[in-house]
Image: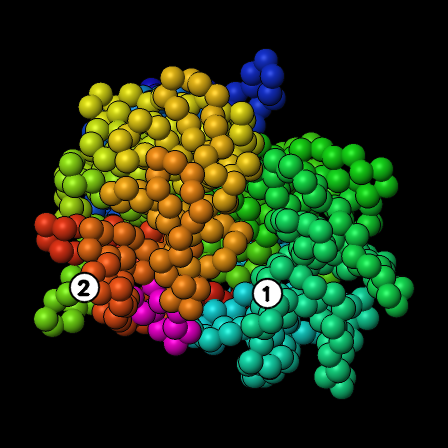
Amino acid sequence: MTETTHHVFQLGMCRVDASDNSLSFAATASEPVQRVTLQPKFIEVLTYLAERYPRVVTREELITDIWEGNGYVGEKALTNAIWHLRQHLGKLSDEEAIETVRKTGYRLCIEPQFERVAEDPTEDLEQKVRNLGRGVSILLLSLALLVALIAHHWYTDSQHRPFGIERLTADGGSERFPAVSPDGRFLVYGGQQPGKKGSLFQLELHNPSASPKQLTSSETDELRAVWSLDGTALYFPSQTGKGCSIMRLTLKDGHLQPLTECSSATASIDLSPDGKTLAYIGEGPEDASTGIMFLDLTQEDAKPQRQSCDSDCAYRDRDFSFSPDGRYLAIARRFGDISEDIFLRSLSDGTERRLTQGIEDIRGLSWHDDGRRLVFSTEEAGNRDGFVLDTDTGEITPLHVDGLSYPRFIPDSDELVFYHYNNHRQMVTVPPFAEVAQAPFPMIYGNFSQRYVDYSAAANRLVFVSNESGYNEIWTSAPDGSRRQMHTELKRQAASPAWSHDGTRIAFVAADTNHEGNKLHVLDTRDNSIRVLASPYINHGRPEWSGDDSFLMASTLDGLTRFNFNNAEPAVFSPVQVRRMQVEGEWLYFTYADGPRGLWRMPWDKPAEPQQLLSSRQLTDGYVWTVTEDGVFYRAPNSASTLLSFYDFNSGESRAIINLPPNSISRQESMAWIPGSRELIMVSWSYPRRDVMLLRHPALQ
């Protein structure tokens, strides 16, 4: 007779083995057999869907049976599991391996084939007894060997400990960018409370009862540091109202020495293995953009030397790490605004090799002590995780550690520290002129994010980006968040949608197919067709429609550029570099990307000298504002809270209307005004709690 085992089954070219939580993909002409190990819960979800194929399984059923009804944990964990499964099973078919059935649950789209094993029914009782005796003997021998093996490993190999995550900080605020001293005794990190500046703190790792020691002033802003080779000093960027400086802090006496200028308190910084070169993200005297700078610490008056591209650059270097032998620099390089990858540069001859292709956002990288492997963190569709990259073979192994950010290896160890981050953006509504003040009210409930909101009065619908499908796609909804519809299935990041004034089309940017920049896309909501506009530029800023919808405008390397729909060559409309813009009536309102702060305007149909509407004292944010027929809603500067104000066109005066907790409104998002209901739509986020963690993982050993 035969018996079906639900521990092993086939999904197309993938063999799923629940006994060891593995997926094995069959060899192809270009790739050998690939085997990956997933978290047990991920395999449980996949097996559960396979056993019930082709039925739709509700989220409630999955949470009840796999997470024992723990909705608090299960809601988020299930979304995370589905996302990871889709990433791994995506190579099996052009269609989704797991389908989301709206408002219901999930369905497996590939028919599973369960393996069958043979069983001999003729085995007599005597043979069974003999088999049982042998089995008991083998079991006893196995147990003895297992005990000996465990004792051996416990005694001889204390470094190779099992997988585990240990919390190192829990201050209730935000602890970021951890780094451990060369002797492994101390942890330094940037600590910050809501609405306040960051400071560097030092914690003794092997003394659980020790309190963190504040190293820098509360009047300046410091968040990221690197240790000197002997562990007696720290190098870090420090920001004040007058600018940013790279500082050297001698720990013994607290002496501070400024070394050179930098770009921001969160700028990447690292020290070469020989301790002679300090590398950081900064700006040279003639540079218009940030880049990697090298400072020779052996010379008293050394000048920083720029390592990154310095003019007409198609990319920006954002993060980096020296290899343990000092021969290479691993660089996280951003193309445009929504695509980033890792490159390996030889410091001897400057040659480079690309190591990854198609990452949305990189959140830190660090070399393993073996000099071959890199650990890096990514943020894809709002979810953060860690990966191990073999720089020799190009193989990437997921760590499956939710929220892993900015990893840093402990010196001479295969353990690392990181900070945990998990925060979702959410559309909220608030009536700014209500007689009784009201707090922002969530519009869409669920364990996913919404971003980049815009409203069309003609269509009476909102457009936004949501990661509900596992990717950042374009969605629309009614003004109250109901009747949602997903319009794109690009399976790569889309961003910054903007309605045409007639309410029929949506312009947005999305990563190009090579993941080396972005392209302007136009979605026609009448038939859901998408057109990509011809452009010689690699990067395009947030698009906006002309007042008559006859062309698009977007900021490019050359300035504010006009894009036509007849494939004519784009033309530079104005040399200004724009961060965000909005056409209302005859005016184009905008904020500068690299210019004076405040809100400016000029006619949308012809270039002219910009006029300043709000001063730099009134408006410092580049994104958090929206123009109506009567005035401008905007986020006013206020370090202690989030203060929303309104500028009245008729009176020419501003007044405060809503005071919210600090950091409650995302500073990279716009707002939308709904005239009919007189409501303001914003993108809210809770102040993210970041705790420093220590990670032990088999993939790092």
The quadrant the N terminus occupies is top left
Magenta stretch bounds: 635-644
Q: Position of residue 9 (x, y in %)?
A: 39, 26
Q: Which residue is mark 1?
A: 265
Q: Is residue 123 magenta?
A: no
**Crowding at label 1, few (<14), some or many (≥20) Cα neighbours within 10 Å?**
many
Q: Is residue 639 magenta?
A: yes
**Crowding at label 2, few (<14), some or many (≥20) Cα neighbours within 10 Å?**
many
- Disc 2 secondary structure class: loop
User: What residue is shown at x 17% (from left), y 50% (from top)?
Assistant: 674
C-alpha distance separating marks 1 and 2? 34 Å
Q: How many marks?
A: 2
Q: Nearer the viewer, residue 643 or 428?
A: 643
Q: Which residue is outermost to the top?
A: 29
Question: From the viewer's perspective, is 514 left or right of 325?
Answer: left
Foreground: disc 1 or disc 2: 2
Q: Nearer the viewer, residue 695 or 197?
A: 197
- Disc 1 secondary structure class: loop
User: What residue is shown at x 56% (from left), y 16% (from top)?
Assistant: 28
- Say which label, 1 or 2, has the lower sequence index: 1
Way the structure is coloured: rainbow
Q: Which residue is mark 2?
A: 432
User: What residue is shown at x 27% (from left), y 44% (from top)?
Assistant: 584
